[in-house]
């Protein structure tokens, strides 16, 4: 099990609502060499799956938070190099030039949120209230709360009206997040196989 995390503190605040879609884009838009369908098949064939995940937590003794975007992957040891190769392509070769596919992702996110508004309305209100008192909850509200829904409604129009602006934002986010000082690895495996995996990390 390998988690690759990106510290969201380095992003401008205006980029935070993009983070859930940015994470999906890395796994669902395809690369310079593979369209999204072929890339998805490669992920399924070579690994046990790779998915984006958001995490934000308060930190002890501080008003600051620990907000992260993770790419969580898993693979058998013999497929480790395949896992690293796929992660490399996600990070450096994802093509942010497919407005139709990205618009579909935006509409899916919007429909999913609107569908849960009534049955999970108390959770939405709770997060909105907590966002006034802690940075961690404010961050999550930007990416999962009512603010995110308002953002998605605006973004659906922006994709049609000014795609170059949306694409530029995604490209800028990639450049910022891929700084080495903004990343962390979390690896879970047995000790003997760690001896095989550890030499691969510096090269990656």
Image: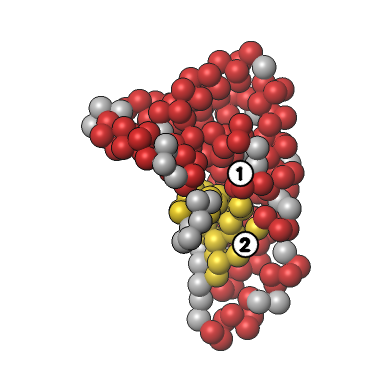
Q: How far across and down, in percent of the image, does residue 1 sit?
A: 51, 67
Q: Which quarter of the figure has residue 23? A: top right
The residue that appears at 56% across and 73% down in the rendered structure is 77
* Label 1: few (<14), some (14–19) or many (≥20) C-alpha neighbours in 10 Å: many
Relative vertical location of residue 38 with respect to residue 168 in this rendering, above or below: below
Q: Give whichever of 52, 47 is nearer the camera.
A: 52
* Mark sitting on residue 58: none
- Counting residues from the start of the chain, the first of labels 1 and 2 encountered is 1
* Label 2: few (<14), some (14–19) or many (≥20) C-alpha neighbours in 10 Å: some
The residue that appears at 59% across and 80% down in the rendered structure is 194
Q: How far across and down, in percent of the image, does residue 32 sit?
A: 73, 41
The residue that appears at 51% across and 63% down in the rendered structure is 74
Q: Is residue 75 visible?
A: no
- Residue at the disc numbered 1: 26
* Mark sitting on residue 184: 2
Q: CA distance from mark 1 to mark 2?
A: 17 Å
Relative vertical location of residue 98 with respect to residue 181 in this rendering, above or below: above
Q: Give whichever of 41, 123 is nearer the camera.
A: 123
Q: How far across and down, in percent of the image, does residue 105 sit?
A: 51, 30
């Amino acid at each position: 099990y390998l988690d690759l995390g990106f510290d969201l503190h380095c992003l401008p605040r205006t980029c935070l609502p993009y983070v859930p879609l940015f994470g999906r884009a890395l796994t669902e838009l395809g690369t310079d060499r593979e369209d999204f369908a072929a890339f998805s098949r490669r992920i399924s064939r070579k690994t046990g799956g790779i998915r984006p995940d958001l995490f934000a937590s308060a930190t002890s003794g501080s008003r600051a938070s620990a907000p992260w975007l993770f790419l969580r992957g898993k693979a058998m040891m013999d497929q480790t190099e395949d896992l690293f190769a796929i992660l490399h392509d996600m990070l450096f070769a994802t093509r942010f030039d497919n407005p139709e596919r990205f618009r579909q992702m935006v509409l899916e996110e919007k429909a999913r949120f609107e569908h849960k508004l009534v049955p999970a309305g108390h959770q939405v209100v709770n997060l909105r209230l907590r966002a006034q008192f802690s940075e961690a909850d404010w961050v999550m509200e930007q990416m999962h709360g009512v603010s995110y829904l308002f953002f998605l409604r605006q973004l659906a129009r922006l994709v049609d009206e000014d795609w170059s602006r949306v694409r530029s934002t995604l490209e800028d986010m990639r450049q910022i997040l891929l700084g080495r000082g903004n990343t962390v690895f979390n690896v879970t495996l047995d000790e003997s196989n760690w001896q095989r995996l550890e030499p691969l990390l510096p090269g990656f």
